[in-house]
């Protein structure tokens, strides 16, 4: 009950933020929809909150979905586009295939928003708001979400395979991947803190348990007690589809325990533990700072999420406002497919 009260207070504060300020970021503004869709934040919140009642992972999944969108040709909802005759979907890229979640929730949000404010709100903005609400529902920070993005007319699977950092990257590779997006070392450490909630498949870290860097041994930076636990969850010859918590201590709560886990060598992914275990790395004092002061982490996470949300945005006459997030406007095949799918869903819901 106490945790739910905290969430309610956080949501009310977030509502106040979105209703009362007009701070801008580049060509975007938190008040972009104040006149055209004034109830937008509440609509998005209600859909995600209902989803969270049966799926405690949804908040983390929506934060990750936003990240996977922004790192591929900018924050333009390209990750939402399905395969068509003219689109090669990013959802089938190696980092996304059978991995990204929350697409159905985003579609439900879009339907609810279209019912209230037809043809007004982009899918890219919905993704951005959904990430903030995902943080809030986990007990994490809210922030003023700059809005006014347009949706892309294209996707880029090749770029998704190139730009999305895999879980086995070392620190040098991670820094380079973030630098391509205009994000610095503090952004890297702050945004990695989103791994304070959610789950990961065994396949993303199995090499650390049994054959790190083809040595035939486990990763020496992995706590041996944690190693034994993970080996029970992820047997050596299993498929790798088993799930475990990204955060060993508070898996469904957005807090700063991710950083204390790194200090104790309990980071799940290699790309996590690299932030603390790379010798003499400039990320170590940032990890220590975020571990010792949750407010400092939250402040930096807010700033980095806003910064990431501004990558490569389409505004004004660029792009479009998709009427259906999975297809560009005018894709008659895609829209017909969705109409058929929605009709079947309606029939099922009425039976």
Image (cartoon, rainbow, N blue to C red):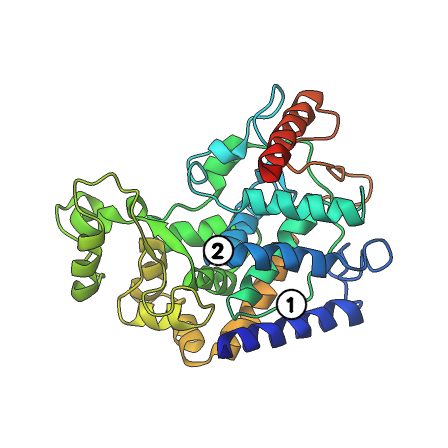
Q: Position of residue 298 (x, y in %)?
A: 53, 72
Residue at 46% x, 37% y is 162
Residue furthest front as drawn: 351
Residue furthest left as drawn: 216
Residue 199 as seen in the image, left or right of residue 7: left
Q: Position of residue 343 (x, y in %)?
A: 65, 30
Residue 56 as seen in the image, left or right of residue 167: right
Q: Nearer the viewer, residue 256 or 10?
A: 10
Which residue bears the numbered disc 2? 54
Establish if 181 lies above or below 267.
above
Residue at 67% x, 28% y is 339
Q: Nearer the viewer, residue 35 or 218?
A: 35
In which quadrant of the rendered view does residue 335 lie? top right
Badge 1 element: loop
Q: Counting residues from the N terminus, which is met first, the one under dot 2 or under dot 1?
A: 2
Residue at 40% x, 49% y is 173
Which residue bears the numbered disc 1? 143
Q: Nearer the viewer, residue 247 or 38?
A: 38
Q: Position of residue 308 (x, y in %)?
A: 59, 55
Badge 2 element: loop
Residue at 48% x, 62% y is 185
Q: Would you call the spot at circle 1 few (<14 residues within 10 Å), some (14-19), or many (20 or more)?
A: many
Q: Position of residue 318 (x, y in %)?
A: 77, 39
Q: Count of labels shown?
A: 2
Residue 199 shows in this picture: yes
């Amino acid at each position: 009950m106490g945790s739910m009260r905290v969430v309610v207070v956080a949501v009310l504060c977030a509502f106040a933020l979105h209703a009362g300020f007009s701070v801008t970021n580049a060509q975007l503004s938190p008040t972009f929809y104040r006149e055209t869709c004034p109830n937008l934040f509440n609509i998005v919140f209600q859909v995600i909150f209902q989803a969270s009642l049966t799926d405690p992972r949804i908040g983390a999944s929506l934060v990750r979905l936003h990240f996977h969108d922004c790192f591929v040709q900018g924050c333009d909802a390209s990750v939402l586009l399905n395969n068509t005759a003219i689109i090669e979907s990013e959802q089938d890229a190696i980092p996304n295939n059978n991995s990204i979640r929350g697409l159905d929730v985003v579609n439900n949000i879009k339907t609810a928003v279209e019912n209230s404010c037809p043809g007004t709100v982009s899918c890219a903005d919905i993704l951005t708001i959904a990430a903030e609400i995902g943080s809030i529902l986990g007990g994490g920070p809210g922030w003023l979400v700059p809005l006014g993005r347009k949706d892309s007319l294209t996707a880029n699977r090749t770029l998704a395979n190139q730009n999305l950092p895999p879980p086995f990257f070392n620190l040098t590779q991670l820094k380079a991947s973030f630098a391509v997006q205009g994000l610095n070392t503090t952004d890297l450490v702050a945004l990695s803190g989103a791994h304070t909630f959610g789950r990961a498949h065994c396949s993303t870290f199995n090499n650390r348990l049994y054959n790190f860097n083809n040595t035939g041994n486990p990763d020496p930076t992995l706590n041996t007690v944690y190693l034994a636990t993970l080996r029970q969850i992820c047997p050596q010859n299993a498929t790798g589809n088993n799930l475990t918590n990204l955060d060993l201590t508070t898996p469904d709560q957005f807090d700063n325990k991710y950083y204390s886990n790194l200090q104790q060598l309990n980071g799940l992914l290699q790309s996590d533990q690299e932030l603390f275990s790379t010798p003499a790395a400039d990320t170590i004092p940032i990890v220590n700072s975020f571990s010792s002061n949750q407010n400092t982490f939250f402040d930096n996470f807010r700033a980095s999420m806003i910064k990431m949300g501004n990558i490569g945005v389409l505004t004004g006459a660029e792009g479009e406002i998709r009427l259906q997030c999975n297809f560009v406007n005018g894709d008659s095949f895609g829209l017909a497919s969705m109409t058929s799918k929605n009709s079947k869903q309606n029939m099922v819901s009425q039976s």
